[in-house]
């Protein structure tokens, strides 16, 4: 018998895909030859936002900028823990300018913003579990974020950072292969990680929900959970069933257009943690 999980109200940051397009390819999902239906992208993104608001969460908006088509993936702009913002420094020059837009948002809203010296893509490669081991940061490297940024994040945020090596280019950000379900529980696809990283995850999270390759390929792990309600890509039906069996409530959303950029639910949502 599974028990019912307890939700917690969240504050999120999102950015409308008004300027979304796929004109370059910086991950294996992107193909500039495939056409994007931007009207549909905006509509699907709007449904995601309404879903989060409908669950009682606060969603702040970042103003989208022309020429920054990946800005919709707001998770990559920073990583916020205990009211401190560790800013992003993007790997690819096509996205570099996004970091300033996030910085301006945080500074105008009174957050303590710390600019990064090292390459890192914010919540794309960093995750936080407030109640695991007293407050633990998980961090991915191998494709975007540099391992030295993990050490920098630990210095800035004062929480232990566990480095995990990603090995499959389809899962180029941590948030494509691992997700936080509640304050102490994760779900992940082991095949995206090095053997050593898999051992570390088993040691730290023996009760994790293990996702399979089909779940991960459907972008199922790229989800947003409030501790009970799990907003995830509607294509990830297998993972939804597993989560339901574990006591969570899956809330499927359709995000087919944004998948063309190599992202889904979590990529579109940054969490602001006081
Ligand atoms: N096209 C974007 C990139 O390759 C997608 C980012 C997805 N975001 C994420 N948090 N995984 O950078």
Image (cartoon, grey):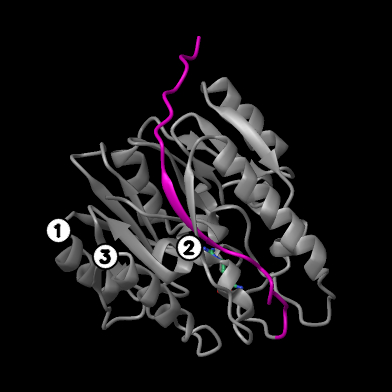
Q: Secondary structure at mark 1?
A: loop
Q: Is residue 231 above or below residue 102?
A: above
Ligand 1's quadrant is bottom right
Q: Is residue 193 left or right of residue 70?
A: left
Instruction: Select label 2 or label 3 by which is in front.
Output: 3
Q: Which residues are magenta?
A: 1-23
Between 255 and 199, the residue placed more toward the observer is 255
Q: Is residue 166 left or right of residue 131?
A: right
- Where residue 43 sits: x, y (%)? 76, 57
Q: Secondary structure at mark 2?
A: helix
Question: Is residue 7 covered in magenta?
Answer: yes
Q: Quadrant of residue 181?
A: top left
**Mark 2 or 3, nearer chain start:** 2
Between 146 and 110, the residue placed more toward the observer is 110
Residue assigned mark 3? 110
Q: Secondary structure at mark 3?
A: loop
Q: Is mark 2 within 8 Å of ligand 1?
A: yes
Q: CA distance from mark 1 to mark 2?
A: 21 Å
**Mark 1 or 2, nearer chain start:** 2
Instruction: Select label 1 or label 2 by which is in front.
Output: 2
Residue assigned mark 1? 158
Asked if residue 107 can be seen in this view, the reply is yes
- Residue 75's disc number: 2
Q: Quadrant of residue 168?
A: bottom right
Instruction: Select label 3 or label 1 by which is in front.
Output: 3
Q: Would you call the spot at circle 2 few (<14 residues within 10 Å), some (14-19), or many (20 or more)?
A: many
Question: Is residue 254 covered in magenta?
Answer: no
Q: Is residue 27 left or right of residue 132?
A: right
Q: Are marks 2 and 3 in contact (CB under 8 Å)?
A: no
- Where residue 3 sits: x, y (%)? 46, 14
Asked if residue 141 can be seen in this view, the reply is no
């Amino acid at each position: 018998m599974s028990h019912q999980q307890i939700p917690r109200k969240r504050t999120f940051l999102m950015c409308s895909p008004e300027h979304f397009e796929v004109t370059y390819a910086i991950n294996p999902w992107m193909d500039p030859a495939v056409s994007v239906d931007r009207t549909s992208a905006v509509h699907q993104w709007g449904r995601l936002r309404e879903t989060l608001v409908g669950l009682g969460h606060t969603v702040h908006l970042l103003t989208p900028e022309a020429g920054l088509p990946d800005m919709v993936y707001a998770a990559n702009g920073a990583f916020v823990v205990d009211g401190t913002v560790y800013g992003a420094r993007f790997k690819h020059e096509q996205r570099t300018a996004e970091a300033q837009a996030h910085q301006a948002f945080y500074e105008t809203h009174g957050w303590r913003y710390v600019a990064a010296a090292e390459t890192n893509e914010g919540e794309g490669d960093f995750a936080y579990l407030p109640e695991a081991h007293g407050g633990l940061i998980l961090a991915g490297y191998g494709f975007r974020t540099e391992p030295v940024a993990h050490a920098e994040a630990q210095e800035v945020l004062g929480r232990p950072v566990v480095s995990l090596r990603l090995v499959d280019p389809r899962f180029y950000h941590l948030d494509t292969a691992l997700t936080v379900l509640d304050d102490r529980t994760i779900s992940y696809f082991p095949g995206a990680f090095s053997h050593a990283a898999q051992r570390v995850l088993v040691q730290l999270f023996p009760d994790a929900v293990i996702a399979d390759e089909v779940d991960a390929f459907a972008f199922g792990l790229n989800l947003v959970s409030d501790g009970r309600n799990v907003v995830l890509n509607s294509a990830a039906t297998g993972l939804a069933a597993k989560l339901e069996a574990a006591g969570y409530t899956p809330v499927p959303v359709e995000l087919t257009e944004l998948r063309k950029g190599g992202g889904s639910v979590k990529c579109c949502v940054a969490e602001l943690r006081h």
